[in-house]
Image (cartoon, rainbow, N blue to C red):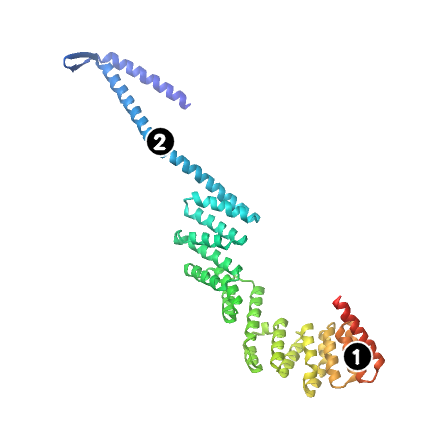
Amino acid sequence: MKFVLWIVGLFALAVLLGLASTVNNGYAILFLPPYRMEVSFNLLIVGVIVLILLTHGALRLIGAAASLPAEVRRFQRQKKLKAARHALREAGLAFFEGRYQKAEREAAHSIEDEYSPENKALALLIAARSAAATGDTAKRDAYLTQLDALPERLRLARHMLEAELKLSAKDPLEALAAVERARALSPNLTSALRLELKIRLMQKQPDAVLALTEKLLKADALEPEQARRYRIAAYNQQLTGFTSGAEVARWLKKVPDVERANPDLMQAVIDRLLLLGDDAQAAQLLSASFDKGEASPELSRRLGQLAERLPAATRVELLSRAEKWLAASPDDHWLLVALGRLAFAEQLWGKAQSYLEASLSLQTTLAAHAELARLFEATDKPELAERHYRQSVELALSDEN
């Protein structure tokens, strides 16, 4: 349709020009001494128009010729940029495929010809991460250094990547410095807080770990179960710094009840008290855990370790609660072994034998056989003692194999 309109328009223009030429009968005189020329005015108009068109065309050709080198350079630059963008895409794909050498190589090609700061930053980040994955720390650090020359708004990603790389390289001081630089740019960045949490845990700074855990939990950046694990780890680190049972007792009062009920934490507390020689407090905590139904096989084993180290009155008190504990944990064979040791220490031979034989009925263990051997030896039954000693040795040898 547009072509038809152009044709019609051109014909209309030709008709108008033809009519105008018949109306205009004037002429023009061109005088250039000693020459004098008379030409039709219509021809002069046509000549001027043609001259203008020729001049315009000539100027366009001259301009195109003058700009040809710049056009060539622009074309070459566009070609290189296209190759750089393609290399960046290939680097990203190779990185997520786990082909880190190819990812680093393609990213390096992209860096050379890329002029966009965002794309260059992305290429440098991929190259640095890939170099770290292949163990080339020199290249990793060189790529990170190049990121410092980019605009400040792009440096947050650089600091976060450096923190992750330093943390994975077991360099907590450098990782923490990178996290602090990232937090200076974005104070409430939860991913930076999570990294700092891991670093503080690695540096054994339990107070900082507890504070960061609560902060992340309030920001919904940490699952409750994850928060609990971090708390338990921090509490375990705090435990190692105590040098007396009194310090442990004061500290326990500050620990929330929900955490204090954790069997793993209680096991660590008992181990610390045993190491410090505070058997009375260890027995008290074990008794309280069993009373609350928070027993575990490991806690039962700790009770068995304490059996012969406790005063007689404490042993009797613990045995008086035995039935309640067994009702709450009927399948805990280690609890039966512990009660058997308590009864043995009090020379309650029949009760000790019943506990130990009940333990064997649930699970055949070297400890139960060894305790029964001791029991029968103490009650002057050498044949039975010999039989249980032999069975305990057989179990020990089978465990080694």
The quarter of the image holding the C terminus is bottom right
**Residue 203's x, y, as percent?**
51, 68
Amino acid found under the numbered disc labelled 1: Ala
Q: How far apart are marks 2 and 1 (CA)?
A: 103 Å
Q: Residue 227 carries which label?
A: none
Q: Is mark 1 on a helix, strand or loop?
A: helix
Say if mark 2 contacts mark 1, CB within 8 Å.
no
Residue 274 in the figure: left or right of residue 173: right
Residue 187 in the figure: left or right of residue 54: right
Pick out the residue farthest to the left: 33
**Residue 234's x, y, as percent?**
55, 70
Identify whether 177 is placed above or below 82. Answer: below
Identify whether 312 is placed above or below 200. Answer: below
The residue wearing badge 2 is: 68
Q: Around disc 2, counting alpha carbons within 10 Å, would you say few (fewer than 14), some (14 to 19), or many (20 or more)? A: few
User: Residue 16: which quarter of the image?
Assistant: top left
User: Residue 369: which quarter of the image?
Assistant: bottom right
Q: Around disc 1, counting alpha carbons within 10 Å, would you say few (fewer than 14), some (14 to 19), or many (20 or more)? A: many
Pick out the residue farthest to the right: 383
Residue 48 in the figure: left or right of residue 247: left
Judging depth in this view, the residue of 214 and 306 nearest the camera is 306
